[in-house]
Amino acid sequence: MFKAIFSAISFALMIGPVPAMAQQYTYTSGEVWAVTQDLPLAPVTETGPKPTCNLRTQIWDDKGLDIQYVLINRDFVEPWARVHSDSWKLPAGRTTDITLDMAGGEVPVSVTTATETALAGPIRRERRNSDNYFILELSVQTMLNTKGRGVGFRVRFAGNEPAWPVSAPDRYEAYQVKTALNKCIADLRRKAATFYPVEGNAASGGPTSPFAEEPEGQAQKAPAEQPQSDRPQREKLAPSSNEWRFAKEEEEGTVLCLAETEQSEIKVGFIGQPGAAMSGFVSGVFDKDTRAVWTVDGRTTASSSGSLDEYFEWYAFNDLPDSLLDDVGNGEELRVAEFGGKGASVRLSGAGAAISAFKRCMANE
């Protein structure tokens, strides 16, 4: 059973001109990887350190790699790569390239001197780098495989620094690290308002407003009164076709549990027999066998190969983790997409209730 090591310690880390962090939280620390969270003093400044989750190697004493998830504003977590070695004496301001040679492909990263012994740089989400981001997320999930053997990777350098082989953790540590990393990033997002307070009127002590100021002397017209009969009717409307639904159906003598949504002629959902493994399915997007990434609210949750199910006429995706159901049930948007290819996003309105019923059905409850 997983027990996250969650201890908060205050520390002052001064390396040259780098500002001190206020706190560091350790979520888990294993043989190969650790997950930590660094929090600066709030609010953050434009040039100061940012709140960060670190997926940090533990296999070397004198060097290491951090895959960092940096909260760069209220809404956006940006992945970074940071490498350091005690044997380096790096010139200030220099930029070079490193390559993360991973299971999903190569991820080139432009890194700049951060300290005399460290280089760091972002893996941006602009369109030209979108493949790099998805390759990184897929490869991290592949490395943290809890159902089989994970896949390690290498860090390659433009100079004469030998490549660094990074091994995959065992299944137990993979579960610890994966759970800790997901929690760390979720906690980081929840703290966004603390580090990036709303600007505008709130900065001067007044409340904010979604309305533009009215010209002086012009009174705002009151909205037309809606018929009283409309209001209770809205609350009683049946779920729209965009909402997720649950169904327990019988196909050729077999009981099936089903949670699905259909939006803009695209159908996405989960299906399974009670007591057996569930599968995901997508209809209206793919036209050949594929491998796709399942992303909830911008965070990659799973990847799986999909093939045509001729009976249902959709593409079925097996080997999806059960944790994907929890993410879908608690999320706002699900995206299923190939690397650099076709994909679709669906809203998760009503998914919480549908997924909860689906899980009970699968458990024969």
Image (cartoon, rainbow, N blue to C red):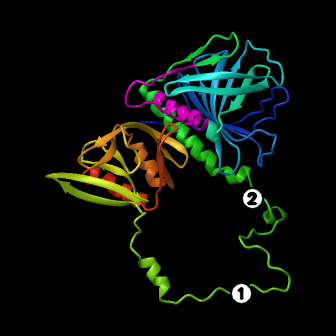
Mark 1 or mark 2: which comes first in sequence?
2
Q: Is residue 269 above or below residue 31?
A: below
* Mark sitting on residue 221: 1
- Residue type marked 1: Lys
Circle 2 sits in a helix, a strand or a loop, which is it?
A: loop
Boundaries of the magenta span: 129-154
Image quadrant holding the C terminus, namely bottom left
Q: Residue at x 51, y 19 (%)?
A: 167
Could you tell me residue 136's position as x and y percent?
55, 32
Which residue does the numbered mark 2 point to in the structure image?
Answer: 198
Image quadrant holding the N terminus, namely top left
For the question of whether residue 336 can be seen, the reply is no
- Residue type marked 2: Val
Residue that sits furthest to the left in the current view? 253
| Image quadrant assignment for residue 163 | top right
- How many numbered marks, from 0 up? 2
Q: Report whether 265 appears left or right of 118.
A: left
